[in-house]
Image (spheres, rainbow, N blue to C red):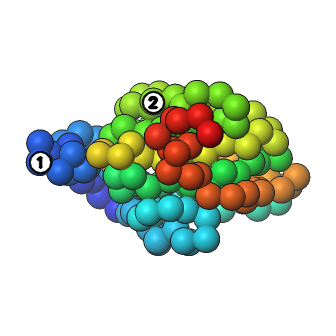
C-alpha cells in the first residue's frame, strides 16, 4: 500500500527522526503492543502471510530509545535499515549499530532484539520467512542494562 512520501532527518536538538534523513513511503501503521515492545513503536504490515506466500513483511518505526523484547523466529528474519540509527543484538553477542542501507539476517530460533538508539529513531523493514513453522516467540523485555550494552 503506497501512501506517499515523507522524508526524515535527525534534528540537532532532539536527535529524533525528522525531515530529510530517510524517505518514508508507507504509513507508520498501528502502535505496537506494550507487552512486546518498550517505548513507542509503530508497525505497518505491508504483506500478510497466506498459503502461497508465508513471508510477512512489516514496516517498523521506532522512536528514540524504543525496542522490541527479546524474541526469536522459527524461520529467521531479515531486517533492512531504512533510516535513523538502530540497534540489533543476538543473545550472547555485542550490539550491532544499524544505519540506512544495512541488512541483517537473524538466524532461525536465535533470541535477538532490535530497536532505535537512545537519541535517534530508527525505521526498518522486517521480513519473516517460513511462517508456516511459527512467526515469533516472544521472550522477556530487554533490560536497560542490556540496552546500554553492559554486562550483567
Name the outermost residue toward the left: 13
Find residue 139 and report its image quarter: bottom right
Q: Which mark is residue 13?
A: 1
In the rendered structure, the answer to whether residue 84 lies left or right of residue 35 reads: left
- Residue at 39% across / 52% down in the picture? 65
**Residue neighbourhood size for the residue with mark 1, other residues' Cα within 10 Å, grouped as few (<14), some (14–19), many (≥20):** few
As drawn, 80 above or below 96: below
Query: How far across and how far down the image is residue 133, in percent?
Result: 88, 52
- Residue at 38% across / 32% down in the picture? 100
Find residue 42 and report its image quarter: bottom left
Nearer the observer, 66 or 148: 148
As drawn, 72 above or below 105: below
Name the outermost residue toward the front: 152
Query: How far across and how far down the image is residue 82, in percent?
Result: 40, 39
Callout 1–callout 2 Cβ contact below 8 Å: no
- Residue at 11% across / 42% down in the picture? 12
Quarter of the figure that contains the C terminus = top right
Q: Is residue 152 visible to the viewer in this orientation of the structure?
A: yes
Q: Which mark is residue 102?
A: none
Dot 2 corresponds to which residue? 97
Q: CA distance from mark 1 to mark 2?
A: 21 Å
Nearer the observer, 125 or 36: 36
- Dot 1: element: loop
Q: Is residue 2 visible to the viewer in this orientation of the structure?
A: no
Query: How far across and how far down the image is residue 128, in percent?
Result: 69, 47
Query: How far across and how far down the image is residue 89, in percent?
Result: 60, 36
- Dot 2: element: strand
Q: How many marks?
A: 2
- First along the sequence among labels 1 and 2: 1
Nearer the observer, 108 or 143: 143
**Residue neighbourhood size for the residue with mark 2, other residues' Cα within 10 Å, grouped as few (<14), some (14–19), many (≥20):** some
Amino acid at each position: 500500500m503506497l501512501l506517499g512520501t515523507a522524508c526524515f532527518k535527525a534534528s540537532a536538538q532532539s536527535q529524533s527522526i525528522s525531515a530529510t534523513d530517510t524517505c518514508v513511503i508507507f504509513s507508520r501503521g498501528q502502535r505496537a503492543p506494550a507487552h512486546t515492545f518498550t517505548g513507542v513503536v509503530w508497525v505497518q504490515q505491508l504483506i500478510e502471510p497466506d498459503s502461497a506466500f508465508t513471508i510477512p513483511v512489516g514496516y517498523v518505526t521506532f522512536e528514540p530509545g524504543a525496542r522490541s523484547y527479546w524474541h526469536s523466529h522459527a524461520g529467521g528474519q531479515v531486517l533492512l535499515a531504512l533510516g535513523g540509527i538502530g540497534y540489533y543484538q543476538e543473545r550472547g553477542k555485542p550490539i550491532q549499530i544499524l544505519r540506512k542501507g544495512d541488512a541483517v539476517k537473524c538466524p532461525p530460533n536465535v533470541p535477538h532484539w532490535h530497536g532505535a538508539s537512545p537519541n535517534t529513531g530508527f525505521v526498518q523493514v522486517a521480513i519473516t520467512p517460513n511462517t508456516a513453522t511459527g512467526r515469533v516467540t516472544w521472550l522477556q523485555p530487554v533490560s536497560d542494562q542490556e540496552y546500554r550494552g553492559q554486562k550483567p
